């Protein structure tokens, strides 16, 4: 009998692995695979060994919890953690911060890996308990659903089919292996499992439809909505950016994919805005423009070729953005947007390309300033060239916002910095690193002053809570107040790298500041805290280097790391077609993931699974009540007969109590005319065996197998509805709970 249990335990391991597999999608690398495998294997092994040695369910669960704790701590230490209270607390806090401020897939940091490995272990424990310890393999579909819900909700997109196929195959193996352990045939296992699987699938679909409105999903970024998954969708950009709005869009589909050799890819800019009024930025796509052709040098307003910079190439292999917008790094040197765009327009003041036709694939060359880049002059630029009056305008700010911007410049040290460039660096550093600022897509309630509500920018500076739009706006207005031309850039973070290809999702949409300096032109600064925005530009680090003033001068740098100004030919890597379907505009950044609500939903599902298991577990206890106290062969035979009678009642058959085996068989045939020949013959053999067990001088062969054959034959002939009822609401379970209630009455 032990040998028949081994395939069942192996199938449970496969199901636990298949159920935990979707969790790998929640990290940005494959670093979770090893830790998750170790935790899953150790938890499963603890349960399998305990069942093999016939331990009680309570002992098995306790042993698996200990194994889970040991395995999780092992992952923590193996990945560089220290077993001190302070280290554990800091790791947990970093994991929580990553979950609240990052878009899935999460960064592969220590806390995230430990958290997801622990989740894989918990899934394994529940799957193993339901399918192995409680011996209810068909109900394992309930705990298996939890990681699928978690991954799908966090990613905001449907998982690939391979995850569902693997889980379905593993579940089928668990059911078939359980049938084998009971001595049933393959056909019997299939006939028993398929109707239940169909019923469970229907229940799961209905549950998903009911719970869908309340299941939390990650919000999509600003100004971008839609996706480029395959070529079925397209992405549009909004013309406005509202500081007063929390983010609640729910689409996190892919926008584009690209390849690059750059060590640190640059953010992808789609447009800029210099016009701010009443808490709203209005993106600019109406000119003035310069006409451009593929593979020709593009204008970079105000940027000198001698500025230290690297030249990088980016090849977009799948693009879902709709014209006129296209995502590309700033400081473009050349671009090729495919045969559909033999010419294109470039913004005269911002260098942003605008297209007339979709570009399913395209390539660009761009410059990225190095850490040595500095302005060629410490003079503040005035209106002229690519700098407009809007880039210096603070007149549209309410007086309350102006006062708070003044205090921001003073608190950051920007107002007292030596050069304009140092002022911008100090302002960015303060907004990125000062702990009083909190990154969140849920804005704080609007405060009032002198009986009037604060404007959106003032409310952000007062509550110090916001997302990239608020941080970028604060820096732009702080720079303008110090006489520095500044504007907001809108686009995407570089995305997530997978096997050499970067994928940019709508949830990667982002806003940052651009400040104009002589010689550098419009220069990127990112004041959003680093966990969301990544590393700052190399020329504006988060920590002072002590030499920034020395690096600034009134003339061009004496040495340059810039690459040749000649333009390489750039061509798209492929041509694909894209759909013209449109979507509604969104807002930048992604939502902090509402883990509490998701855990509430998953906790509700776990509670439903627990409640659904009450009657089956009670029924099992009722059927085994005689066997549990048996100490002789005759008593064990009586236990098998008792379990058989209750199993028949669970399937809807009428069986009398208190009669001899012969009388019981006769009554069964009389009261249940529908059983077939197989059931009646099996019952006749079991009856003969029980008569020999009860009345013969010595006991013979165990009657357990004969009684099991009666139950299997009856189950095979029962309708699928009767089998589902016997599984979920058995009569034996109701009888056990009723008797238990009577015993507990005063």
Image (spheres, rainbow, N blue to C red):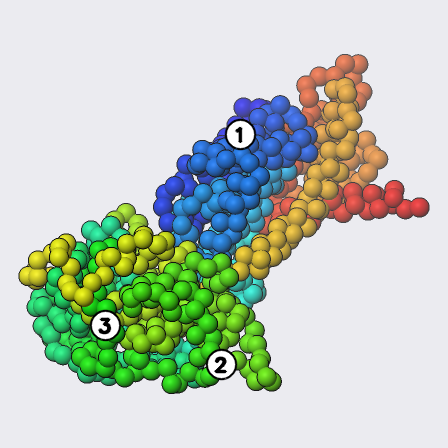
- Side of 623 relative to 315 (left or right): right
Mark 1 vs 3, N-terminal side = 1
Instruction: Look at discs 2 and 1 and give the one toward the viewer.
Output: 2
**Pointer 3 residue:** 379
- Side of 455 relative to 695 (left or right): left
Q: Quadrant of residue 367?
A: bottom left
Mark 2 vs 3, N-terminal side = 3
Residue in the picture at 78% in, 35% down: 664
Q: Position of residue 255 (x, y in %)?
A: 31, 64
Q: CA distance from mark 2 to mark 1?
A: 64 Å
**Pointer 1 residue:** 45
Helix, strand or loop at disc 2?
helix
Please indicate, yes or no, whether residue 320 appears anywhere in the rendered image.
no
Numbered tag placed on residue 338 in the rendering: none
Judged from this view, the residue extending furthest toward the left is: 566
Q: Quadrant of residue 361?
A: bottom left
- Examine the rendered structure and indicate whether residue 272 appears above or below residue 620: below
**Pointer 2 residue:** 400
Q: How many marks?
A: 3
Mark 2 vs 1, N-terminal side = 1
Instruction: Look at discs 1 and 3 and give the one toward the viewer.
Output: 3
Query: Are the residues flagged by discs 2 and 3 in contact, CB closer than 8 Å?
Result: no
Q: Position of residue 570 (x, y in %)?
A: 11, 61
- Side of 581 relative to 8 (left or right): left
């Amino acid at each position: 009998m032990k040998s028949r249990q081994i395939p069942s335990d192996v199938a449970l391991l496969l199901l636990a692995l298949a159920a935990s597999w979707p969790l790998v999608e929640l990290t940005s690398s494959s670093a979770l695979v090893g830790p998750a495998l170790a935790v899953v294997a150790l938890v499963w092994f603890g349960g399998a060994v305990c069942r093999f040695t016939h331990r009680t369910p309570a002992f098995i669960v306790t042993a698996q919890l200990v194994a889970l704790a040991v395995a999780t701590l092992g992952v923590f230490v193996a990945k560089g953690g220290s077993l001190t209270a302070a280290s554990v607390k800091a790791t947990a806090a970093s994991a929580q911060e990553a979950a609240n401020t990052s878009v899935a897939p999460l960064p592969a940091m220590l806390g995230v890996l430990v958290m997801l490995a622990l989740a894989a272990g918990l899934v394994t424990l529940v799957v193993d308990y339901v399918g192995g310890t409680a011996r209810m393999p068909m109900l394992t579909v309930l705990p298996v659903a939890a990681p699928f819900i978690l991954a799908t909700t966090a990613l905001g997109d449907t998982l690939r089919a391979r995850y569902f196929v693997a889980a379905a195959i593993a579940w089928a193996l668990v059911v078939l292996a359980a049938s084998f352990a009971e001595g049933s045939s393959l056909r019997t296992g299939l006939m028993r499992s398929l109707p239940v699987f169909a019923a469970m699938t229907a229940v799961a679909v209905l549950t998903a439809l009911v719970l869908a409105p309340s299941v939390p999903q990650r919000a999509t970024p600003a100004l971008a909505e839609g996706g480029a998954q395959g070529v079925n969708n397209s992405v549009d950009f909004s013309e406005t950016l509202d500081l007063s709005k929390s983010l609640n869009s729910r689409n996190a589909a892919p926008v584009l994919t690209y390849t690059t050799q750059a060590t640190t890819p640059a953010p992808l800019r789609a447009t800029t805005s210099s016009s701010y009024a009443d808490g709203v930025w209005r993106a600019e796509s109406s000119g003035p423009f310069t006409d451009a052709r593929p593979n020709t040098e593009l204008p970079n307003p105000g940027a000198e070729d001698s500025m230290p910079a690297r030249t990088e190439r980016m090849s977009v292999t799948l693009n879902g953005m709709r014209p006129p917008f296209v995502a590309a790094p700033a400081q473009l040197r050349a671009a090729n947007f495919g045969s559909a765009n033999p010419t294109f327009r470039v913004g005269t003041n911002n260098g942003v390309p605008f297209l007339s036709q979709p570009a399913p694939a395209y390539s660009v060359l761009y410059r990225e300033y190095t850490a040595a880049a500095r302005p060629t002059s410490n003079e503040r630029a005035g209106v002229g060239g690519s700098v407009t009056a809007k880039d210096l305008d603070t007149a549209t700010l309410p007086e309350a916002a102006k006062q708070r911007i003044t205090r921001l410049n003073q608190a950051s040290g920007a107002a007292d910095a030596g050069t304009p460039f140092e002022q911008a660096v100090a302002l960015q550093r303060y907004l990125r690193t000062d702990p009083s600022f909190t990154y969140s897509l849920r804005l704080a309630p609007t405060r009032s002053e002198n009986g009037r509500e604060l404007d959106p920018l003032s409310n952000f500076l007062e509550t110090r809570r916001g997302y990239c739009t608020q941080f970028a706006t604060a820096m732009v207005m702080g720079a303008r107040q110090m006489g520095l031309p500044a504007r907001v850039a809108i686009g995407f973070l570089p995305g997530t790298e997978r096997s050499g290809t970067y994928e940019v999702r709508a949830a990667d949409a982002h806003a940052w500041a651009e400040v104009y300096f002589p010689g550098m032109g419009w220069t990127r600064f990112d004041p959003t805290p680093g966990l969301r925005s990544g590393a700052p530009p190399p020329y504006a680090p988060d920590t002072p280097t002590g030499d920034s003033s020395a690096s600034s001068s009134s003339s061009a740098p004496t040495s340059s790391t810039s690459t040749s100004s000649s333009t390489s030919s750039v061509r798209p890597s492929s041509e694909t077609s894209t759909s013209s379907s449109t979507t509604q505009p969104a807002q930048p950044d992604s939502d902090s993931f509402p883990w509490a609500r998701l855990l509430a939903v998953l906790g509700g599902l776990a509670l439903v699974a627990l409640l659904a298991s009450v009657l089956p577990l009670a029924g099992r206890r009722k059927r085994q009540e005689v066997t549990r106290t048996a100490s002789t062969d005759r008593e064990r035979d009586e236990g098998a007969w008792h379990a058989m009678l209750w199993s028949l009642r669970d399937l809807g058959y009428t069986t009398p109590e208190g009669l001899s085996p012969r009388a019981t068989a006769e009554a069964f045939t009389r009261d249940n005319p529908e059983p077939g020949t197989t059931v009646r013959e099996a019952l006749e053999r079991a009856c003969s065996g029980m008569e020999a067990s009860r009345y013969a001088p010595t006991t013979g062969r165990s009657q357990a197998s004969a009684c099991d054959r009666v139950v299997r034959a009856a189950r095979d002939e029962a309708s699928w509805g009767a089998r589902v009822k016997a599984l979920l609401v058995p009569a034996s379970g109701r009888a056990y709970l009723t008797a238990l209630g009577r015993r507990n009455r005063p």
